[in-house]
Amino acid sequence: MTVKFVVDSSCDMRDTEYSNLTTVPLTISTDRRDWLDEDLDIEEMLSELETYKGRSYTACPNVERWMKAFEGADVVYVATLTSGLSGTYNSAMVARDLYLREHPDVKIQVFDTLSTGAEIRLFVEKLMELNDQGCSFEEICDKAKEYKKKTRLLFSLKSLHNLAQNGRINKAVASAIGMLGISIIGTASTQGTLEPISKSRGDKKVIAKMLEELKKLGYNGGKIRISHVENEHLANQIKAAIKELYHGADVLVYKARGLCSYYAERGAVLIGCELA
């Protein structure tokens, strides 16, 4: 039996990491060019967007891309970017229904993660772990839904320029944040929207605030996944601070892909944490 794990590119995972993983790219666009979130030069995209004055936006994978990703599998587990911010989940569900009409013996479960980035990675890793343990399709679906209740996302953003250009926040607010050198600390809500928690100035205060928020959430040494947007130094500082407090914690640092790099922007850090 062939099992596939299919995720959109907001998860920041890459196909080369696992033989049974397929990532489906979103698209980042301006009025003059498009970037497909697949083997993308993140630095080049960020540099152009930082000087671009026009509208920018993103597009979810089309149905055909999802259906192609399902091919060749007997069982497919799909994890998508939160439906609270994107049509990606709906696109994957349409693809699932169409694919099952032609392949009724295939089992496909689509999960709306209500999150993005590092928290999705934790979820996919759990799906893989349950599969390796020999759990049935039904058991994996049930246990994964329960596991989702035990993970959270925290993030630190140094710029809100693209969110403003995308029409998601006020441009005057975004401009003020950039000029004052303030980082916005936030989380993914249980409804799948991104919510600010506080503001911090300087990396030391960001690290301290992240540790404080982890403690508030009830974190006690579970898995941590940290993706960053051209800010490996801060990501590694957060990793070191976590491991100093929680010896033996499984913490992984890696670069964000295009979609998260677009929304979170240069200097951002996204933390997915596994709670007790």
Image: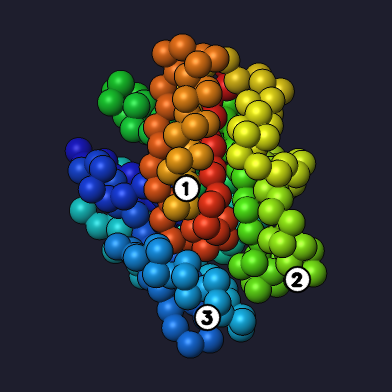
The kind of residue tagged 2 is: Lys
* Circle 1 Cα neighbour tier, 10 Å, few/some/many (<14 / 14–19 / ≥20): some
* Mark 3: secondary structure: strand
Query: Residues under labels 3 and 1: Cα distance?
Result: 24 Å
Type of amino acid at the residue the image marks with label 1: Asn
**Disc 2 crowd, CA 10 A, few/some/many (<14, 14-19, 20+):** some
Q: Mark 3 points at which residue?
A: 30
Residue extending farthest to the bottom is 32
Disc tally is: 3
The residues bearing labels 1 and 2 have C-alpha atoms spaced at a distance of: 24 Å
- Which of discs 3 and 1 lies nearer the camera? The answer is 1
Q: What element carries label 2?
A: helix
Q: In the image, 166: left or right of 233?
A: right
Position of the C terminus, as image quadrant, is top right
Question: Which residue is denoted by mark 2 in the rendering?
Answer: 171
SS type, badge 1: loop
